[in-house]
């Protein structure tokens, strides 16, 4: 995943924590709201300041064509948001907790 995130400017996602990895890598997230349930399924919720929400594939394509990658200021905000809202899984701690 980390290699793929280095090779792209955008990620289309739906209800997954991978979006936080994308933010930490400086990738612009586009939430795919095909069922119009964004408020319930978007892990970025209402707090992320640069939300892009697409309801169909045409809106996704429009975003990719028209929206530039993050600016330096936006990158700093995205990194800070990702750090403050998501921690990678520590395999050792998880195994100790489950066993």
Image (cartoon, helix red, strand yellow):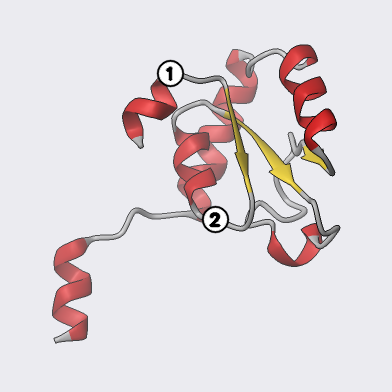
Q: Which mark is residue 16?
A: 2
Picture mark count: 2
Instruction: Compare marks 2 and 1 and give the one earlier in the sequence.
Output: 1
Residue 27 at what x, y percent from top left?
Answer: 54, 27
In which quadrant is the C terminus drawn? bottom left
Q: Taking 64 as reference, is 97 left or right?
A: left
Front residue (pair 9, 70): 9
Residue 41 at what x, y percent from top left?
Answer: 69, 63
Residue at coordinates 46% horizontally, 35% vertically from top-left?
24
- Secondary structure under the numbered disc 2 in the rendered image: loop
> Please, which residue is most extreme toward the bottom here?
99
> Mark 1 = which residue?
7
- How crowded is the residue under tag 1: few (<14 C-alpha within 10 Å), some, or many (20+)? few
Residue 58 at what x, y percent from top left?
Answer: 84, 29
Residue at coordinates 30% horizontally, 59% vertically from top-left?
89
Residue at coordinates 14% horizontally, 78% vertically from top-left?
96
Residue at coordinates 49% horizontally, 36% vertically from top-left?
22
In which quadrant is the N terminus drawn? top left
Front residue (pair 95, 75): 95
Disc 2 from disc 1: Cα separation: 20 Å
Front residue (pair 77, 9): 9
Q: Taking 44 as reference, is 46 left or right?
A: right
Residue 80 at what x, y percent from top left?
Answer: 52, 38
- Secondary structure under the numbered disc 1 in the rendered image: loop
Front residue (pair 73, 24): 24
Quadrant of res 76: top right
Q: Is residue 94 above or below residue 13?
A: below
Is the residue under label 1 in contact with that under label 2 (CB below 8 Å)?
Answer: no
């Amino acid at each position: 995943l980390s290699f793929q995130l280095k090779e792209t400017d955008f990620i289309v996602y739906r209800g997954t924590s991978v979006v936080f990895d994308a933010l930490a890598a400086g990738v612009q997230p586009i939430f795919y709201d095909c069922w119009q349930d964004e408020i319930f399924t978007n892990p970025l919720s209402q707090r992320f300041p640069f939300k892009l929400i697409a309801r169909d594939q045409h809106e996704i394509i429009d975003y990719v064509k028209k929206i530039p990658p993050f600016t330096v200021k936006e990158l700093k905000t995205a990194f800070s948001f990702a750090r403050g809202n998501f921690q990678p899984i520590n395999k050792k701690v998880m195994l100790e907790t489950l066993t």
